[in-house]
Amino acid sequence: MEVTNRYITIKAHIDGAPKESDFELKDAALPLRVDLDTNVVIVKNLYVSIDPYQLNRIKSFSSSQSAINFAAAVTPGEGIDAYGVGKVVVSGNPEFEKDDLVVGLISWGDYTVVKPGFSGLTAYAGLFDICKPKKGEKVFVSAASGSVGNLVGQYAKLFGCYVVGSAGSKEKVAILKEKLGFDDAFNYKEVTDLKATLKRYFPDGIDIYFDNVGAEMQEAAVANMKAFGRVAVCGVISEYIDAGKRAAPDMLDVVYKRIKIQGFLAADHMNVYQDFLQKTSDQLSTGKIQALEDISDGVESIPSAFVGLFRGDNIGKKIVRIALE
Amino acid sequence: MEVTNRYITIKAHIDGAPKESDFELKDAALPLRVDLDTNVVIVKNLYVSIDPYQLNRIKSFSSSQSAINFAAAVTPGEGIDAYGVGKVVVSGNPEFEKDDLVVGLISWGDYTVVKPGFSGLTAYAGLFDICKPKKGEKVFVSAASGSVGNLVGQYAKLFGCYVVGSAGSKEKVAILKEKLGFDDAFNYKEVTDLKATLKRYFPDGIDIYFDNVGAEMQEAAVANMKAFGRVAVCGVISEYIDAGKRAAPDMLDVVYKRIKIQGFLAADHMNVYQDFLQKTSDQLSTGKIQALEDISDGVESIPSAFVGLFRGDNIGKKIVRIALE
């Protein structure tokens, strides 16, 4: 048996903000047949994740020369990896059977050959492993209604911290305060002076800044940090699309306030994976944590879903549903 | 008995690079008398330390608004604290007797009332506590012939690291390579592309960057770091005199290479003080560590000694000898 695998690829490496026209939908015949001893598994993709970090893998070499060594670069014309959920169609691996649901690295398309992987650790590891919060500490989260930010805020609240988030619309701010239990939130687009704004929300200073955006917001947060403050640099979405945009935090603050600025990737924190999975699934099932998801349909909607991330279109984790089963 | 205490003060808070004319020599009558139960000790200053960080305490409020909360600000007309060595003249403290030699926070002048303190931990704590080196790791030190930098390099070499330093003259580079045993060193003033230069000295990347200067050098070092690299931000002398000058390291590097950028102050690392003191005095006495000192004479030479720090005049630790005994 053979199916047509439709998948999204890039026409060429991208500079600056992505446009839908940078992408194209291709298709290829895929025989649903695997050899027994190869361990190959063919998966029908059900849901795929749309994340800002993927831009770093499809940018031109010149605009991301050093980062490209650390995240595998995507070749134009080929498929684009993403975390997702799928269903096994044929299995050459004794650990998987037909119709098993699998979670891991799949691709932006109808079908994939799955390598088992992991997902969603970022918020948990970044907050607990990198920032080591103490009860009562003051936490600031940027892009707080994004896939990672909303979980960081919820974890920090459950842990006993005071949490303020920034987001890019009234609607997002309302969700943070009313649905997710943030102590406070503000729309950064309505603010002219970020430094003064953070001073108002944190008159005694910030202990932890979970940075999803970089640039001016990181500078303003560092200026408002307390002594021994911690900045977890999870992503810098405002810098992804504009390599000229940089965070230049005041190093005098960094020295005198003994601030730690730490980049991290979830993949290094597999040590807390079991802990994360257990606690989070308990908290989700008891309603202590709200899942904030933004779902659109169809493999052809992937480019607009991705481009929308950089305009702040999504509220919560952006997912594309490829198939219902 | 009464003496005349000559001391250096500032005429007003300073903006930008310090000039000798920002300072003045004042004098005041000082009765050499203390009440018995006050624990006050009057010390005749012998040597005082001249350090770049002192600029942050004498800058105008507007140019160091946030840092000033963390380092006590100096008032124009009053004395300026500094680490140093002195001899007890009169003691109202049972722990000190006349003619005892003391080390600690004294002041830029002939006499001081001493509070016992500490000194010199910076290089040791910054390297070992903040950067946690492993044998064989590649270490880059800026301002490597300065008071802290030269010790960092020597400690790192003794520990088994590969060490390259940058400094601002041929003479300094020669001292690093020939006297202090650095594996290599370069004159940053002869270099047009810092990033490419570091790439040449560290083809496989930098594990540890001990930052004494900030700005472009920090950016170039971060661009050349390996995964899990550590930047200890000890001081940012190039930013002290120009608040507009900032380090804007690429946060994509910080995230993907999981880089830690950590500010610190020696005062937080008293836990390693005994260890530091013991090891360093052993290593100094057996010649494994060279003391690199740059001494000038007389309280009136303090302003030019201080101003010279920001021109890179000093080779090693800048000290002013106030009196021979």
Image (cartoon, coloured by chain):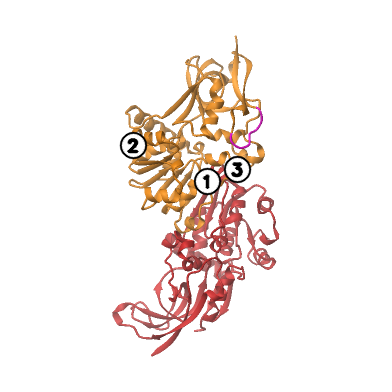
Chain colours: A orange, B red
Question: Residue at point 47% right, 30% down?
Answer: A314
User: Toward the viewer: B265 or A193?
Assistant: A193
| Relative depth, front residue between A241 and A62 | A241
Q: What whole-number distance in Å separates the C-alpha atoms at marks 1 and 2?
A: 27 Å
Quadrant in the picture for the N terminus of chain B: bottom left
SS category of the residue bearing label 2? loop
Asked if disc 1 and disc 3 are in contact, CB closer than 8 Å, the reply is: no
* Residue denoted by label 1: A215
Residue that carries the numbered disc 3 in the rendered image: A243
Examine the rendering and report whether any part of residue B171 can be seen: yes
Marks 3 and 2, the one that precedes in the sequence: 2
Separation (CA) of disc 3 from disc 2: 34 Å
Q: Residue furthest left?
A: B37
From this view, report whether residue A105 is shown above or below residue B283: above
At numbered mark 1, what does the secondary structure look like: helix, strand or loop?
Answer: helix
What range of the chain is rendered magenta? A11-17
Q: Where is residue A95 in the image (x, y as percent from the top left)?
A: 50, 20
| Protein chain holding label 3 | A
Q: Is residue A275 visible?
A: no
Residue B18 vs residue B147, the one in the foreground:
B18
Q: Where residue B147 sits: x, y (%)?
A: 56, 67
Residue type at mark 2 is Gly
Q: Mark 1 lies on which chain?
A: A
Residue A181's mark?
Answer: 2
Whether B46 is drawn above or below B144: the answer is: below
Q: Which label is found at residue A128?
A: none
